[in-house]
Amino acid sequence: MRMVPSSLCRKTIRMQSPRRYLLLFVGLCSLSLCGQQYYFDQFSVSDGLAQSTVHKIIQDRNDLYWLGTSVGVASFNGVQFVNYSSTDGLAEGGVRAICEDRSGKIWFGHKEGGISVFDGSSFIEVNSFRESIDQSTISSILLDKDGQLWFTTVGAGIIKLINPEAPPDQYQFEHFSGNELSNEVFGHFQDQEGRIYFVTDLGAVQYSDSDSSRFKPLLVHGVPSYGQTTAVLIDSRDRTWVGKFHGGLYRYNPRLDSTEMYDLVKAGLKSNWISTLFEDKEGNIWAGTFEDGVVRISPENKLDLFSERNGFPGMKVWSMMQDREGNLLIGTNDNGLCVYKGDDFISYYKEDGLINSQVTAILERANGTYWFGTSEGISILSRSSAGESMRDFHMLHGEEIEFLKEDRQGTVWIGTFDMGVSSYSRTG
């Protein structure tokens, strides 16, 4: 099991197993690109993905990850991938957009204009508004505060599905295109108040259903109007970030009425093409580029650069998201799924209490204990004001552990190499 909670990022376990090499890290330091090595888990074709281009990633309410690839969809439970394509009921073509609606259905937008939905048991191709979209790529899907779904397209404007919880033959939709909106819409974002914005080939626009002109240009002070806008974000501090096509990154602070420009080439990357923007739970802004990795900007305005030269395995970044455990997941064009693991670390070994130094799975439980699966059983790390203690788990002693996962009821599911799957439902 290679997916691990970021709350363990301060700890690292190294092992000598010939089949796995698992690292856990946290403790983030602001160091230069040349001198600092960062750590990522990479999942690609050799790990079970059908294809190594990952356009979009979400985590659903059941903690299952969904990845849109150039040949369909993959689900990932933290242990293994399951791949789906048109033979499973999906529309034809790769998946560029994914969204979960209020009822738990998962919606997929396809490169060739198709829309699919997973209702929990099967995939269904939705053809209600295919004529309006034609072959235009579905670039993003937005769930708004009223439960409606917005499908942005590159070529046909925007489709709003008013009643996504209705049966497919009763869907009602509204189509925005032509004079009031550019047909080339690349993405969307919402601010803290639920206001909706769209990124088009003519710049960003704000949507308002109360005005006669429903789409108004988003004019950001100090950001040049020339050069295509590729990504926009309004962060938790009400600052507006604008990414440009080969034009770098801009940040507007309304409280100071000031704009700062970030030239990523001068900072050390090889590209100023901003492909995506994301704010994590700690208030860091992450900017993905489409030619040379990622930059992280801290709340203190410190920059950390991530590229192939210091451990990041993907040059071209499509998307980023942070899961409920705090892991940062990055979808790349050629290198599959990357999971950020941090940098600074200390190690636990057998002499520190591990039942075996070959660590094959790691779990942080809801009660705060850490479970380490090894080739000879499980060790449990507990922390208190008195310090740390390590003990052996009484079950499955001597068994090689394949994976550890805790469900919402607090039951731990334990996969082994020889004895299948076991469960443990007590606390501790």
Image: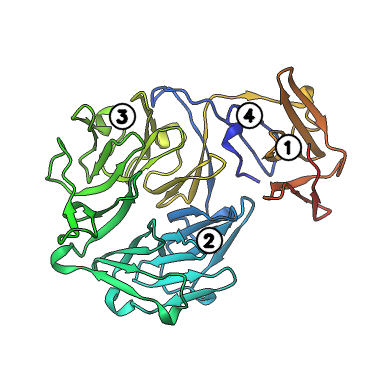
Asked whether the residues under the numbered discs 1 and 4 touch, taking CB atoms below 8 Å apart as contact, a structural biologist would say no
Badge 1 amino acid: Trp
Judging from the image, the colouring scheme is: rainbow
User: Which of disc 2 and disc 4 is earlier in sequence?
Assistant: 4
Q: Is residue 92 above or below residue 284?
A: below
The residue located at (38%, 73%) in the rendering is 114
> SS for tag 2?
strand
User: Which of disc 3 and disc 1 is earlier in sequence?
Assistant: 3
Q: Which residue in the structure is indicated by mark 2?
A: 74
- Residue 200 appears left or right of 97: left
Q: CA distance from mark 1 to mark 3?
A: 39 Å
Badge 3 amino acid: Gly
Q: CA distance from mark 4 to mark 2?
A: 29 Å
Q: CA distance from mark 4 to mark 3?
A: 28 Å
Q: CA distance from mark 1 to mark 4?
A: 13 Å
Percent coordinates x, y for residue 264 in the rendering:
27, 33
Asked whether the residues under the numbered discs 3 and 2 touch, taking CB atoms below 8 Å apart as contact, a structural biologist would say no
